Amino acid sequence: MNKKEAIEKIVNIPDGQVNMIGSLEIPAGATGIVVFAHGSGSSRHSPRNNYVAAILRSHGLGTLLLDLLTVGEDTDYEMRFNINLLARRMLSTTKWLQEQDDTNRLNIGYFGASTGAAAALQTAAILGDQISAIVSRGGRPDLAWPYLKNVKSPTLLLVGGNDGVVIELNKKAYNEINAVKQMDVIPGATHLFEEPGTLETVAELAANWFVKYLFRHKPE
């Protein structure tokens, strides 16, 4: 990619017979890109994830927001919790990014919400140092439990202070992860971070994490 050119386009990413639709935006000069893995029932149009993505781009990071499930698949509640399928789609997405001229030189990070966080962690465990950093927002990392000990990517777990059950699940997951890690509890926030100022806090913490670990020379 020519570092002087910004990119903004809709992309189609294949996984077998399925094509995932994504919104790809890369600021000029970016050295990293963050793939968003949405939670159950959400999509690339999620206002919360789009807000976070905009903040990341303001820090010079590229973003890819995509639907891991087709419209038809998303009507099946069980499919939303099929972490193996979601992780396979994340693998296909990562492979696609590594093959495109526009993105193959960018360090890759994952931002996962709810079940998407489990898919991100499971995929990162499989790919090892190919994934430079992970941020989980209100995530369910426990759903990727067998993979957590193999995660090598620096991982930031963000949880709402009023999201009691999820706090406990994240604490257990945190103890299982052997990589560089940090867990921040956002005071006053519930699961969706709808309270004033809480999503802004998430976005800034995520941006700082990704800038720290994605603004590096990409390993050959």
Image (cartoon, rainbow, N blue to C red):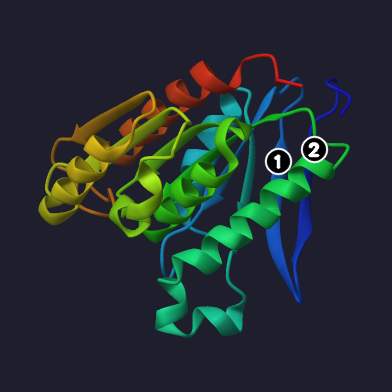
**Which label belongs to residue 25?**
1
Callout 2 crowding tier (Cα within 10 Å): few <14, some 14–19, many ≥20: some
x and y, in percent, of residue 137 in the image: 35, 45
- Residue picked out by circle 2: 7
Amino acid type shown at disc 2: Ile
Asked which quadrant contains residue 56, the reply is: top right
Query: Is any part of residue 196 visible from this angle?
Result: no
Q: First in sequence: mark 2 or mark 1? A: 2
In whole angstroms, how far apart are the C-alphas of marks 2 and 1? 5 Å
Which residue is more in the foreground, 41 or 13? 13
| Residue at the (16%, 46%) spot, across then down | 167
Quadrant showing the C terminus: top right
Indicate the position of residue 116 as horizontal and vertical percent values. Answer: 44, 56
**Which residue: 59% across, 85% down?**
72
Residue 89 percent coordinates (x, y): 62, 61
Q: Nearer the viewer, residue 107 or 130?
A: 130
Q: Nearer the viewer, residue 32 or 96?
A: 96
Query: Tags 2 and 1 in contact by the CB under 8 Å rule?
Result: yes
Q: Which quadrant is home to the N terminus?
A: top right
Helix, strand or loop at mark 2: strand
Residue located at (40% from left, 32% from top): 155
Residue 127 relative to residue 204: left or right: right
Characterize the local packing of mark 1: few (<14), some (14-19) or many (20 or more) Cα atoms within 10 angstroms: many
Please, is residue 101 above or below residue 88 in the view? above
Q: Is residue 145 visible?
A: yes
Image quarter for residue 57?
top right
Looking at the picture, how far across and down is residue 210, in whole percent?
50, 26
The residue type indicated by label 1 comes to Glu
